[in-house]
Amino acid sequence: MMYTNSLYQEVILDHNRKPRNYGKLDHASHQAVGHNPLCGDHLDITLQIENDQINNIAFQGESCAICKASASMMTTAVKGKSRLDAETLIHEFRELATGKLDINQSHHLGRLTVFSGIRDLPTRVKCAVLPWHTLHAALNAIASASTEANDDPVQTVISGNS
């Protein structure tokens, strides 16, 4: 499914104005902080995982519209999923954002493919990927995630193609 630029903008604006699952869970079993030093995005993600299933998830913080929309859609996509399914979505979203995923092939992203054009805006890839990095960190009991150095999705693409 291919999304137009106007639909992309509409989805980003909607999730930025009315983010889903915004806030902090009081009794989180997993949490992580994500930071994008380049633009100042800062997210806290909290999860309640029971029997290997994400029963609840929330995020809060200061971020640009792309990061907030990505976090909002991410939380909606992974709520109720198993850890393995969430990790699959994390991998596929990262591949989508960096231009490695062929959206015409089988994948699990659904409406998240609205972010497919982000690959053409390298400085914005970090904004879209930060919530997913942070979710991965939370699922793996890592306290924080960043989009710099070894965690830089754009750098990973460049070094991966050499």
Image (cartoon, rainbow, N blue to C red):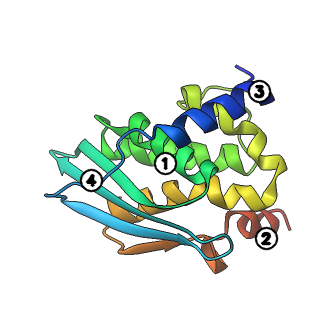
Residue with the mark numbered 2:
159
Q: Is residue 140 visible?
A: no
The amino acid on which the numbered mark 1 sits, given as a three-letter code, is Ala
Q: Which mark is residue 71?
A: 1
The amino acid on which the numbered mark 3 sits, given as a three-letter code, is Ser
Residue with the mark numbered 4:
47
- Residue 48 lies left or right of residue 69; in this view the side is left
- Mark 3–mark 4 Cα distance, whole angstroms, equals 32 Å
The tag earlier along the polypeptide, 2 or 3, is 3
Q: Of tags 1 and 4, which is closer to the observer?
A: 1
Q: Are marks 2 and 3 in contact (CB under 8 Å)?
A: no
- Residue 14 lies left or right of residue 38; in this view the side is left
Q: Give the residue drawn at x 61%, y 70%.
A: 147
Residue with the mark numbered 3:
6
Q: Could you tell me residue 86's position as x and y percent?
A: 40, 44
The tag earlier along the polypeptide, 3 or 4, is 3
Q: Give the residue drawn at x 45%, y 62%.
A: 134
Exactly how many numbered labels are in the figure? 4
